[in-house]
Image (cartoon, rainbow, N blue to C red):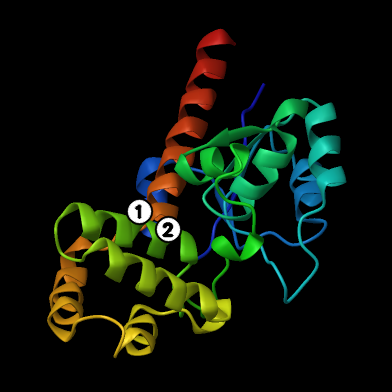
Amino acid sequence: MQQTAIVFLGPSLDRKIARQILDADYRGPAARGDIQRAVEDGATVIGLIDGVFFQECSVAHREILLALKQGVRVIGASSMGALRAAELDILGMEGVGEIYRMYAEGVLVADDEVALVFDPGTWLPLSEPLVNIRATLLRAERDGIITGDAHRVLLEAARARYFPDRTYDGMQQDARGLVDPDVLGRFSAWLEHGRVDLKREDAIRALERIREILQEREIGG
């Protein structure tokens, strides 16, 4: 049987890099009904990475469950995929990566942890998801770039912003007067090479997992 992978991918990972990892039918962020259409188009494995949140109706649980019922493997990670996998893993959807783990364990609960705005033509992110900011601040503190107090102030500044307005520059601007200027300056310089893109890392893990599944199926016939 021909194995076909359809992957819903937007701002979490550059499409060129994705294709180097996995040869698949790549589509933009999934909206309501897109999983069902992927099944109708012959997908045997579906990778749900990016999906729409507030501008359109999000991917429904029911369409994922219908795909699973028809024998389609559904892998979720990074963004909308991590959310849905945490909700449906006990029913057969497979979650991959750190963000999925945090949702599954209740460390993260809010949808806006992974939400961002992006250019619809290029998929380039125009804001920073809170889950990436959390990981970046944690690394910065571990690297001795910021103090624990600065970490808490910066995180609260990011959380207080509506998700389309979350950027590292905006977060630092909101923290001025509450964090030592030298610490902010050091953090700003460190960001150029030290920031963490957890969504990108998990998207890569998901593609590697799908590649593994396809290879297993080819060997198994």
28, above or below 163, in the image = above
Q: Residue at x 15, y 81 (%)?
A: 185
Q: Amino acid at mark 1?
A: Ile
Place of residue 210 in the rendered image (x, y in percent of width and height, measured from the top left): 52, 33
Q: How many marks?
A: 2
Callout 2–callout 1 Cβ contact below 8 Å:
yes
Q: Quadrant of the N terminus?
A: top right
Q: Residue at x 66, y 40 (%)?
A: 85
Query: Front-most of 79 and 66?
Result: 79
Q: Is residue 92 visible?
A: no
Query: Front-most of 194 and 181?
Result: 181
Place of residue 3 in the rendered image (x, y in percent of width and height, measured from the top left): 61, 29
Q: Residues within 10 Å of mark 2 (few under 14, many from 20)?
A: many
Q: Name the mark on residue 13.
A: 2
Query: Front-most of 208 and 195?
Result: 195
Query: Front-most of 204 and 19?
Result: 204
Q: Name the mark on residue 17.
A: 1
